[in-house]
Image (spheres, grey):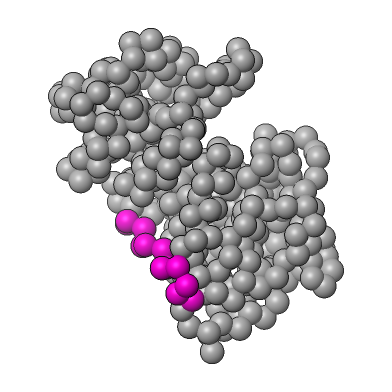
Amino acid sequence: MHDARVLVVDDSAAMRALFCDVLEQTKNVLVVGTAANADEARDQIADLRPNVVTLDVEMPGMSGIEFLEEIMNTNPLPVVMLSSLTQSGTETSLRAFELGAVECFPKPLKATPEQFQKTVGKLGKIVLAAANSNVRDKPRPKAAKAEGESGPDYSPNGKIAAFSASMGGVDALTEVLAHYPKNCPPTVIVLQTEPALAEMFIARADKECGCSVKAAADGAELKAGVVHIVFDPNKHVIVEPGIPAKLRMVDRDPVEGYRPSATLLFGSLSRAGMATIGSVLTGMGEDGAKGLRLLKAAGFRTLAQDRTTATVPQAPSAAIEAGAVDAELKLEELAADVLANCGSAT
């Protein structure tokens, strides 16, 4: 794992000092410089050669989004956007992902001291993961299908598709769902991201994709044509067998530090013996690896996103190293494999 050499870009001197202090407390993270605007940042990138940039969305002159687009078009670097998660902030965050940002991190502007410490404590881990990401080599995601376009007729065979994703997950899921037909397999996705961002992503995906995309809800039935996305940090999700199977949102302590836990979701599918194809996509940490191994042991097909093209390869790598994966595939191939194993085009 490479050390992170970070350039902090923010027009507020107080915020620059705050994020520098937070990052310098993280092992293997070094702040190599700061900048107050895009012009300063451009010079600092050339002189200091950072391998990660944290970039404020709202800056005088060239905005953070405009500067992000410049970076990705001229000298691609891993960029972590810093933004308030207001309505406009979440829309901007989705645009940042489209342009190639590794992650969008919420500025803790109105947090309690305890919430603030917990929130900013994540930033060091995110920046370190960004330094070891595949941004330079990552293919640009394909556009989602236009509203109403459903693609070829598709006949699902009753198998459930289950995915996990975290850092880089919005980008990856945008591409996977772009391949989904209107009558897609019943699908459950654990997405570790900020709830406001997840809600905005779901609303956009439901409008643009051929299938229906919904926020997971207790008692929701798993039926063809519907994708359920789980993101509530206060709830886990399991699948209750039946005809049709149902989602159950449950109160439980985090599993190995994660809530919702992909391992718990995969494990519930394995224990119930429900025919499933499970996939671990881009993300930090090891969530999903043990659960995917349970699915594989039960005789179900298991996949991981190709580590060389995953934005953040930690999660796919953990699953592969755990012996939990039947095949390691690029996103387009992975989506095709899921659809082929869960049904057929007609």
Looking at the image, which residue is at 52% across and 74% down? 181
Residue 288 forms part of the magenta stretch = no
Looking at the image, residue 229 sits to the left or right of residue 175; the answer is right
In which quadrant will I find the N terminus?
Answer: top left
Residue 266, percent across and down?
70, 56
Looking at the image, which residue is at 40% across and 22% down? 29
Front one among 313 and 253: 253
Looking at the image, which residue is at 70% across and 77% down? 158
Looking at the image, residue 49 sits to the left or right of residue 211; the answer is left
Where does the magenta region start and end?
139-150
Give the quarter of the image for residue 17.
top left
Looking at the image, residue 193 sits to the left or right of residue 80; the answer is right
**Residue 166 in view of the camera:** no
Front one among 320 and 189: 189
Give the quarter of the image for residue 23.
top left
Which secondary structure is most common in the magenta stretch? loop
Residue 200, percent across and down?
51, 47
Picture layout, residue 95 above or below residue 13: below
